[in-house]
Image (cartoon, rainbow, N blue to C red):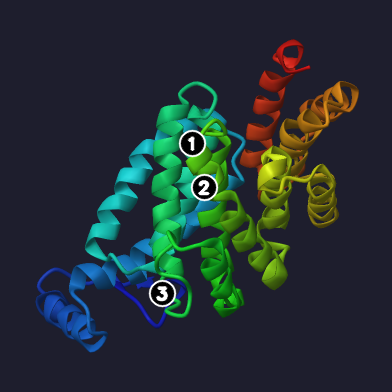
Amino acid sequence: MITAGDSGENARVIVLRPGSFGVRFAPIAFAATAALFGCSPAKYSVGHVMVPVLDNARDAAMASDDLRTFQDGAAANLFLLEGLMRTDPDNAALRLNASMLYFSYAFSSHEATDPAYASKLYLKGMANGKSVLMKNKKFASDWGVSFEEFEKTLPALREKDVPAAVWTAANWAQFISLHLDSTAVLRDIPKVTALLERAAELDGSFFNGLPYVMIGSLHAFRPPMFGGSPEKSKESFEKAFAIAGDSFLLPKYFYARFYLYRVQDAEEFTRVLEAVGAAPPVADDPYRLLNLIAQQKSATLLGEIDALF
């Protein structure tokens, strides 16, 4: 039997002898505990048992040096998350894990080979992140409003909203990057940029500077008529580099892919991507998987250099 205190970290396993009072009364005790927390036994199990397990699985995946196993298993893990979210639809931790996993799976496995499918994954990631953001009732509930109306609600976001804001925006930005030929999609760039800028204002160091990486990318691929600026792009990437240091390779890949391509600096593009590919692994690196993805994608991008410049 598993019992839990106030959090999953306090969960402990108790071995009971068959036929003991504990076995006979465990279902009653569990139901009473769940009733005390105001939820069904299934929902209680999700929040107090499954979420801590999923958090540990996520961290183990991020620190792994086995990219193939991650790519092979991501789809099954997404269905597991979808099932758990059906059981507990309002669980913010589940939604954030799903938003991050949809982003990581699309980015690592399908963006280059099947952009239509990657787009579908990014939209799902965005929807899960947005559902968490909507818990802040002062923030815009209708994202179809004008940019001015959307912008007015951004000060309502607080530091606790940063993870949801960043993963929502990361999925949103990558979706836009796959549809730069669509004027309707490009019109969303000011909103996603403003959302990221508010997140960076609250905690720019989140996920090793990811807000600044995405802001830099948006300013690079954003057309001038929609406010794109190579200067602002470089400035944002430099902030990301200052936070991430040399060991986190993802910002450097995005820098080459978007900024250096935008300014058509083939020499620096080559130098940066080759440095990413040659970077040695770091002991106990919590972002090892993302570094492997950055190295794999850097090698692919180098192979396309003649078509890009």
* Whether residue 272 can be seen here: yes
| Of the pair 114 and 232, the residue shown nearer to us | 232
Give the image location of residue 4, x and y in percent: 35, 77
Above or below for 146 versus 213: below
From the image, tell me which residue sits under label 3.
Answer: 135
From the image, tell me which residue sits under label 1.
Answer: 106
Sequence-wise first label, 3 or 1: 1
Distance (Cα) linking label 2 and label 1: 9 Å
Q: Name the residue: 45% across, 77% down.
A: 136
Above or below for 171 versus 21: above
What residue type is disc 2 on? Asn
Do labels 2 and 1 touch, CB within 8 Å?
A: yes
What residue type is disc 1 on? Ala
- The quadrant holding residue 264 is top right
From the image, tell me which residue sits under label 2.
Answer: 171
| Of the pair 30 and 187, the residue shown nearer to us | 187
* Whether residue 1 can be seen here: no
Q: Name the residue: 49% across, 57% down.
A: 56
- The quadrant holding residue 207 is bottom right
Q: Residues within 10 Å of mark 1 (few under 14, many from 20)?
A: many
Distance (Cα) linking label 2 and label 3: 19 Å
Give the image location of residue 80, x and y in percent: 31, 48
